[in-house]
Amino acid sequence: MKKLIPQFGEARLQSRGDAFTTLARSIVGQQISVKAAQSVWDRFAAAAGGLSTRLSPGAVLKLDAPVLRGAGLSARKTEYLADLARHFEAGTVHVKLWQQMDDEAIIEELVAIRGIGRWTAEMFLIFHLMRPNVLPVDDLGLIKGISQNYFSGEPVSRAEAREVGEAWAPFRSVATWYIWRSLDPLPVDY
């Protein structure tokens, strides 16, 4: 960290968007390139009336599957976005309580939504809720960065990554961000 922080000292993590839009973007972007994800997102958001305003769960629920498919979404992602919208509409995610909830409780709420796994929930904690102490050991970039910066490029297990991450507490999210920057100096927004 002593070597990495001065290289990227001016850049900062920044939250953007509302919770629903952030999670919807993460679903749209799963398993496709950043460029393709932006193209699909733009068509999806336009169909939902969300290009100039926040994307609303109600607007997503009003869209039928053919419209969503026409925006470039797979059948599975269409189901995931509908489930996300239903959870927000029904209030089964406690957005207003998240600031008081611990990370694991939020992760538990989010992984109950189809299409959101632990990694996505952890990215949400880091990039949206700005939680300072998240160590996403399932993140391939983090593992690769720890390997390169701490183990001379030798493969690293999740247990070894956790051990390295212990020294970063209570700012594991920040350290993770610097590790990512060591691999790619351009930050990714979620």
Image (spheres, rainbow, N blue to C red):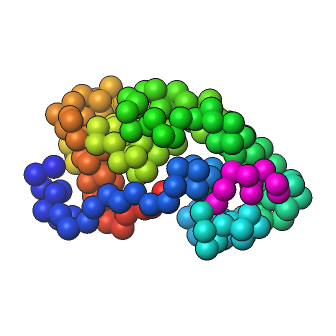
Q: Is residue 183 above or below residue 141?
A: below
Q: Position of residue 151 (x, y in %)?
A: 22, 41
> So how many labels did they put on this image?
0
Q: Position of residue 116 (x, y in %)?
A: 60, 39
Residue at 58% from the left image edge and 50% from the top image edge? 20
Q: Quadrant for residue 173, please give it.
A: top left
Side of 143 where 80 appears, left or right: right
Residue at 34% from the left image edge and 42% from the top image edge? 131
Side of 172 where 126 appears, left or right: right
Q: Is residue 141 above or below residue 114?
A: below
Q: Nearer the viewer, residue 183 or 170?
A: 170
Q: Position of residue 167 (x, y in %)?
A: 17, 34
Q: Nearer the viewer, residue 70 or 100?
A: 100
Q: Position of residue 39 (x, y in %)?
A: 66, 71
Side of 102 where 37 appears, left or right: right
In the rendered image, is residue 31 in sight? no
Q: Quadrant for residue 25, please give it.
A: bottom right
Q: Please, which residue is most extreme toward the bottom here?
A: 52
Q: Is residue 140 magenta?
A: no
Q: Nearer the viewer, residue 132 or 179?
A: 132
In the rendered image, is residue 171 in sight? yes
Residue at 58% from the left image edge and 56% from the top image edge? 21
Q: Is residue 104 above or below residue 178?
A: above
Dominant secondary-structure state across the stretch colored magenta: helix
Span highlighted in magenta in the image: 55-63
Q: Is residue 60 magenta?
A: yes
